Image (spheres, rainbow, N blue to C red):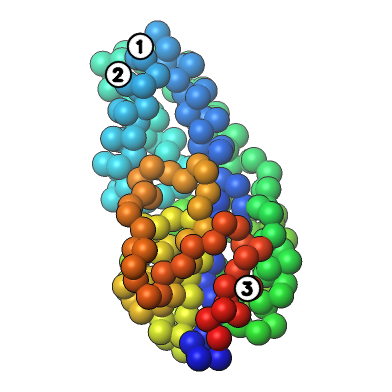
Amino acid sequence: MKTGLTTIGFDADDTLWQNEQFFKLTQERFAELLADFAEPTHLHDRLLAAEKRNLGHYGFGIKGFTLSMIETAVEVTEGKVPAAIIAEILAAGREMLRYPVETLPHVQETLEALAGNFRLVLITKGDLFDQERKLAQSGLGDYFDGVEIVSDKTPATYNRVFDRYGDGPERAMMVGNSLKSDVAPAIEAGSWGVYVPHELTWVLEHIEAPEHHPRYRQIDHLGELRRLIESLA
């Protein structure tokens, strides 16, 4: 094919399986626990600020989210948060680590169709144990030639991964629901970037789409990916 495409990277959370919905449910529970101390909107803003502040310390994932909830609870109660509420927050975090994996529509048939023609790589952020658990429970692991669980997704990340598993970023494509993490840095590295929107994408992953870049594409769901790839041939 004209593109010379040999390697396709896939994001995991909210691209292959549901993820953000569990954070939303836990955040609603968090608001209930702190209802006597802060209004939900104010609490949401304080929690988001804590998450953003803590990314460099705890990284992405449930453990960092749980620690940010505890930190926010301490802040909004001026250090008076009851131990029982801290225990409830910790329990909520553990429960998130036990949620079943729910794959998104068109995922399995798309991976099955592409696996024989391209090298597929899973590239995901988050806690190592949790991401490994979700991949194992998803039943999708055999479709991938490589799995990379990274602390962040930058152009250097995509250069390294696509050099390792493929023929460099210029002959690779990254597919995911985050413009900030999956699409923009992959394009900057020289890859194709395919945006697959998800209704619950985390607010900190929102940026403007690089709509005028020749290597940017958007599809409604993964079932459209094979046709997109064929159109680039």
Query: For residue 108, what is the image quadrant?
Result: bottom right
Q: Position of residue 172 (x, y in %)?
A: 47, 80
Is the residue 61 above or below the residue 190 in the image?
A: above
Q: Nearer the viewer, residue 210 or 90?
A: 210
Q: Position of residue 116 (x, y in %)?
A: 69, 83
Residue 61 appears in view: yes
Query: For residue 138, what is the image quadrant?
Result: bottom right
Residue at image coords 37%, 75%:
214
Residue at image coords 36%, 58%:
209
Residue type (three-letter) at the residue carrying disc 3? Arg
Label 2–label 1 contact, CB within 8 A: yes
Q: Position of residue 140 (x, y in %)?
A: 69, 64
Q: Earlier in the sequence, mark 2 or mark 3?
A: 2
Disc 2 target residue = 76
Sort mark 1 into few (<14), some (14-19) or many (20+) by Cα contacts within 10 Å. some
Horizontal placement of 122 versus 178: left or right?
A: right
The mark closer to the camera, 3 or 1, is 3
Residue at image coords 42%, 39%:
65
Q: What secondary structure is marked by label 1?
A: loop
Q: What secondary structure is marked by label 2?
A: helix
- The label number, if any, that marks residue 37 in the structure image: 1
- The label number, if any, that marks residue 227 in the structure image: 3
Residue type (three-letter) at the residue carrying disc 2? Val
